[in-house]
Each structure stands twice: as C-alpha cells, then as structure tokens.
Image (cartoon, rainbow, N blue to C red):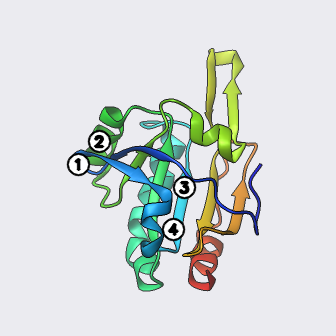
Amino acid sequence: MVDEGDAAPDFTAPLANGDIAEFTLSENLDDAPLVLAFFPGAFTSVCSHEMNTFQDRLADFEDVGATVYGISVDSPFALNEFRDKLDLEFGLISDADKEIIDQYGIGMDFADLGVHDVAKRAVFVVNGDGDVTYAWVSDDPGVEPDYDEVESAAADA
C-alpha cells in the first residue's frame, strides 16, 4: 500500500467533469496539492455523504491551494450522473479497469454481496513533486476521513 513519503503512482484514467476527459496524475501536479479521495461506489449513502462533505468544504480546500478529486471504480458515465445528482463541482476519476486501486494497494471486496475489487475508502494528498504527504485508508467502508485532518495535510503539502 502507498504510504506517506512514497512517490504517488502515476496513472491515466477517464475524468468525469460534466464531460469525459483524460486525467494523468503527473500532468496535473501544477494544481497540487491534490486530494485523491477514493470511495467504494457512487450512489451509496456513505459515499454520497463523503463527496457532499468534500463539496461543502471545497472552498476551504481551494483556500489552501488544494484540488480535490474523487476516485471510484464506477464508469465515467455513472460518475457524471453521480456528480450531477450531488451538484459536485470537482472531478471524479473513473478507475473502471481497477488499475489505480491496484497501484495504490487499496482494493477490497464485499464478498457477501458478490462485489469484488472496489476501492477502500482512502485519502491521499499528493504534493507538487508527486510525493504522498498524507495517507489515510480505512478497512471499514462506513468510516469517513477526518476532514479537518485532510484539509490540514493539504495546507501543509
């Protein structure tokens, strides 16, 4: 699993931003610090609450110079619908191929539901050098990050 002090694994994936664009981590370091908020699945209650909380605090993140992205294994089309439903102003990255969660070491299963290889709820802050300055990963998908801690980490990145 990726931890603080590690180089953030680079990736290219679809970005749901109202349209669908291509997002490459290394090409967006000028917008750092980047807050990469991984979530298990769009349209679920805890994930919706988490993304709404990031939206509610978006101005605070922007005030410290941070750019927020949500990431899940949902398709970019589903993520655009999710963005629309929640009125999110930040982009959502589609890891439909599950390569990013593999690179970051944060895949999990809901075996009793027959759902495999979704993202654990996790947040990574990446600085302008491409280094991870903050890493938080929960084995319990019902637990949300400490948003004050994430904002503080972004301010310090």
Q: Which residue is mark 3?
A: 37
Task: From the top left corner, tell me how far across and down residue 60 is, in percent.
Answer: 44, 80
Labelled pair 3, 4 in contact (Cβ < 8 Å): no
| Other residues around mark 2 within 10 Å, as few (<14) / some (14–19) / many (≥20) | many
Residue type highlighted by circle 3: Ala
Residues 9 and 113: in front is 9
Q: Is residue 72 above or below residue 38?
A: above
| Residue 103 in the image: above or below residue 145 | above
Q: Which residue is mark 2?
A: 80
Image quadrant assignment for residue 39 = top right
Q: Callout 1, which amino acid?
A: Gly
- Reading the image, the residue beneath label 1 is 18
Q: Are marks 4 and 2 in contact (CB under 8 Å)?
A: no
Question: What residue sits right under mark 4 in the picture?
Answer: 34
Give residue 10's position: percent from left, percent from top: 57, 53
Task: Give the amino acid type for the residue marked by disc 2 in the picture.
Answer: Asn
In which quadrant is the C terminus drawn? bottom right
